[in-house]
Image: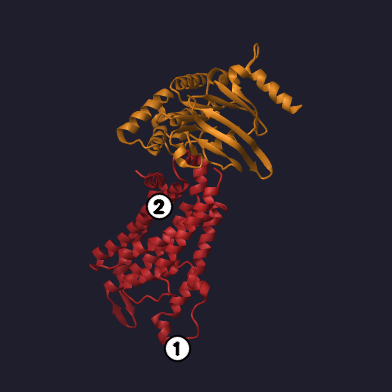
Amino acid sequence: MNNVIKITIYTILDQMRHKSFYVLLGLSILFILMIRGCYDGGYTVNGKMVDTATVAWHVSKIVFHLIAAGMFLMVSMLSMKIFSRDHADGSTVMFLARSVFRWQYILGRVTGTWALCLVFMFILHLTIFLTVWVKTGTVIPGYLTASLVCSINLLFVIACVCFLSLFMPDFISAFFTMGLLFVGFLSDGGYQIINSDIVRSAVPVSTNGGPALWRVLYPKVFMLQAYADAIISKSEFHNMGPFHPLLNLSFFILLILMLMLGCFNRKEI
Amino acid sequence: MNIDMIILDSVTKKFGGFAAVDNVSYTIQKGESFALLGPNGAGKTTIVRMLLDFIKPSSGSITINGRPASDPESRKHIGYIAEQHMIPPYLSGFEYLSRHASLIGLSGKDAAKEVDRVLEIVAMQGPERKKSATYSRGMQQRIGLGAALLGQPMLLILDEPITGLDPIGIRDVRKILENLRGQGVTVILNSHLLSEVEKTCETAAILYKGKILIKDTITAIVKDNETLEDVFIRYIEHENE
């Protein structure tokens, strides 16, 4: 078996040894199941009763993004300690004293953490999907596809935190990454609001210039969330600039992984 | 026929302006039991870390079994135990050894058989399923030695392997090294216990402030009515004068 696959499996197994992993998963599912109550209420908008399916659909969309935001925090916490913990407990020596390439070690650790978080997020999204289906009989097409699309965001966060943790204290690397995401949230969120149907109908569209270049090139984490939202809603996706957020993030992930490998190759064990 | 297992060619390692290893060259032949001696800070562990590519030399080259040390393939047949060997606390000794077995390409029954074999050699059958966090320093060191012995390595690098071991443990390590000598395994031993080195190694080098003061067979280094300790102290004191 390839060393990358072995290290990926070890990473998943080691993370799953922690009881806190199961407690967190259990609490998250419990929280999601508690939302079921929202589907039972009677809601009136502009004097009209909203049917249960519509309510379920809207609530599910909101919870979809809440889960994704929570996952950003969780992956940051998991990723920030990968290298420092491995160094402290002898795992780095265990791998690198054998015929393991440094890139295999890095890729194995990143892939393992990503796979675990992807499954964690997918389980939570699947819980919503099934709850809505059982409770209201409504199947939200695209919900699970959107979950898989959002997992690219998790990979970006893991790569970013791991890379930064090579230069700065663990917590600061996670904090810095959250800052990066927040700037993207303001930039891309603002763009989405300006291009939303409500704002467009209320305010005449200004055609003077597009967004600044840095905003077009910035990591499109929030824009990918918006794309996932569009998949769920089957609505139009307002992209910023010529590059699709999937392409944008794939580029950044590759770039960060290459930089991380370059830095880790020079790192003294 | 003598075959070179390790070649250090003009190897220097600087940390900032300080040369931890200064233009060191030597060759270790296949099957040789070689001891690297020196006081604390002499550069012994730095050399070991360069052999394993944990750190890169500032200049010079290191070749292991015909391959540059920077090539992970050169570590395919190396067993290594670090000074103060660490085992991830969430793993049991058995799991730790199984991972090592897997990393050297063993799987299934072969891996389990090999793990059992080394557990017997290092006398850790019994507590091997307990978490390593519950192990004493000596037990961790035994498991570390077991990991180094997995897969019958061609080269064994032992950095202070008897740290934390009780007298019985030290005797066991000596026996293991004597057996390996009979099997033609190349051994590099970093140790402060000169009496042990004298018993287990054929050749030795004395390292001081990053430089090799002498490298020869122990019988050639140690004259009549002297011990290796006497020779070691004489060399170091001479350098300090």
Q: Between tags 2 and 1, which lies in front?
A: 2
Amino acid at circle 1: Pro
Confirm whether residue A242 shows in the render: yes
Q: Residue at x 48, y 48 (%)?
A: A82
Q: Is residue A7 left or right of residue B237?
A: left
Residue ranking furthest to the left: A137
Q: Are marks 2 and 1 in contact (CB under 8 Å)?
A: no
Residue ranking furthest to the front: B1
- Residue A99 lies, in percent from the top left, at 44, 40
- Which chain did the image draw in red? A
Local SS, label 2: helix
Q: Residue at x 65, y 38 (%)?
A: B20
Judging by the rendered image, the residue that carries numbered circle 2 is A111
- Residue B241 lies, in percent from the top left, at 77, 26
Mark 1 Cα shell of 10 Å, populated few (<14), some (14-19), many (≥20):
few
Whichever of callouts 2 and 1 sits on the residue coming sooner in the sequence is: 2
> Which chain contains the residue that carries disc 1?
A
